[in-house]
Every structure is written in C-alpha cells, then in structure tokens.
Amino acid sequence: MILEFEPLSNNFGARLHGLDDGRVLDDGLIDELRSGLIENGVLLLRGQEISPARLVQLGRAFGELEILPEPDKRHPDHPEIFDLTNVRKDGAVVDFEEPQAVFLRGTERWHTDSSFREIPCLCTMLYALEVPESGGETQFANMYAAFKSLPTSLRNEIEDKKLVHSYVYSRANNPGRMDPMSPEEESKYPPVTHPWVRTHPDGRKSLYMGAHVSHVEGMDLNEGRALIQEVLAGATEERFVYQHVWQANDLVVWDNRSTLHRLRPYEITERRRVMHRVTVAGVDPVV
C-alpha cells in the first residue's frame, strides 16, 4: 500500500498520508485514492502548498472535471477551478447582502454538489488558501449511515420515491438577492429527477438529497417538502457528521454520491476566506 488513511471521527472520513507534493500520480496511486474515497467518504490532505495547476492534476486523477455555473467565479487561468471566496476582485471583503456573499451563505444549507445534473458529479476537492480564525468550518454527513439508521417505516416510505433537483430552484432560494442568470445559462440546467435512495455499485444504499431538491415527484408539494425536512433532520444528526476545522493549505476531498455537506457561518464581511474548488464529473446515473 502506497497511501495511509488515518480515521477522523464518527468512523467517517480519513486523513491522507503519503501523497507528497509533486508525487507522480501513477495508476497504482490513483487506484488507492479512488478506493480510499469510496471507503471513507471524506479525505483530508494537510499542510501542502498546492498550485492551481497541481489542484487540477489531482482532480483529474478522479476523472474529468466539471465547468461550473456562475462564469464570473471561475479561475482566470484554470476554468475548472471555482473561486469560493468572500474577497472581491478589488481585494475588499464583500458586503453581507451583495450577490457574492449571498451565494456563499447559500452553501450553509445541507447539499450535495451538482445533483441538479442528469449525471451528477463524483467528488469535490476544496483547497484552503486563507481561512478565518473562527467559524467557516465545513460539516460532512454520512448518507450511508443515515440511511441504515432510518426507522423501518420511514425507510419503506421513501425507498421508491424520486426527488426533483433544480439549480434554478436552489439558486432562487439563496438567502438574499443574486444577479439573474442569463436565459442561455438557465437553459443549461433544466430540472432533473433522481431516486431518493441511491444504490451504489457495491450494493450499499445511501440517501441522495440536499438543497438542490425542489420537491418529491408525485407527492403534494407541501407534504413532500415536509417529508424531505423530516428525513434531512434525522440524516444530519451529530452522530453522522464530521466537522472540519480548516487550516491554510488543507485539501479536503469528498464523495458527493454518499455525503452531504454545508458551510458553517463566520464573519463573512470581516474575515477573509479564500478557497479553490474543483469538481469531478460523474460517469454513472443515479440508480
């Protein structure tokens, strides 16, 4: 074995050792990375300065990279990198109600990335350049464990149901005003439907839901949304959650197929938080 995976907390997530800066990503190393992600759900690589080019290279070890919505937030030299930051291009920190801050505060809702796509993403990598002294943690919830722990009656109720995911819906429900999407951009992201319970290639099942979900297909709108909130509350109990306290030069990778995540609040108008995000495209539909 080339890599070592040190467990984090709640039997969920692992700190990664052995992936030294500049190490060649050969087939054996890539296979271990992919297997480690499936097994642990969240991987932490700590204390390495990672250039944008290296971040893209690490992302491509897991697959093809997505180009995300919101063109103004893409890295100028590497469009695969999404700049998640509360710092404007002029170097000033955002105001609370401006669209950039609204977008970031929207990620304080539990979600899984790119579930609004017909084939959602595989995983996300987030690299910390600058972090606040307090707040701004990221929480991850284990959807394998959450599904297994559902009461039998609730599990039976949702197992054959489908959820409608919509980027336009989730964007409109951000906590404030955002700049409107162009009709061309909006047309790229029509609503899609996925099973509420996802079955993985190894036979395990997990919940597949989050803030991009608009409603339950075939249910009364209000009843369906109440059911979503009931399941979400149970699925994100503390026993299923790993909270990551960021340090500069942390890289965290998470499996969007089997986890939810959210940003925790911080002084968004006072404390700088600068992150680079890369999202790896999925290859399989949700079944």
Image (cartoon, helix red, strand yellow):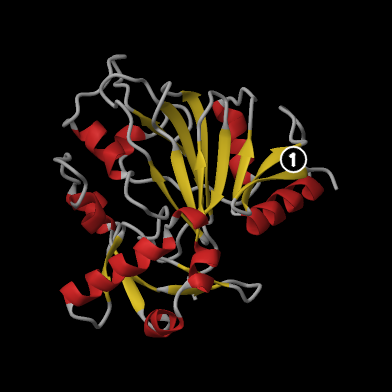
Identify residue type, mark 1: Leu
Compared with residue 3, is residue 72 higher up or lower down, i.e. above or below? above
Compared with residue 193, is residue 243 higher up or lower down, i.e. above or below? above
Residue 81: x and y in percent read 46, 36
Q: Residue at x 40, y 66 (%)?
A: 118
Residue 43: x and y in percent read 62, 44
Give the total number of marks visible in the rendering: 1
Q: Residue at x 55, y 63 (%)?
A: 283
In this orientation, which residue lies closer to the viewer: 67 or 191?
191
Q: Residue at x 19, y 28 (%)?
A: 96
Compared with residue 51, is residue 181 higher up or lower down, i.e. above or below? below
* Outermost top residue: 91
Residue 221: x and y in percent read 17, 74
Task: Report the side of 24 relative to 244 (left or right).
Answer: right
Task: Report the side of 213 relative to 146 (left or right).
Answer: left
Quarter of the image for residue 167 reads bottom left
In this orientation, which residue lies closer to the viewer: 180 or 164?
164
Quarter of the image for residue 26 reads top right
* Outermost right residue: 1
Residue matched to label 1: 25
Q: Residue at x 19, y 46 (%)?
A: 181
Residue 223: x and y in percent read 20, 76
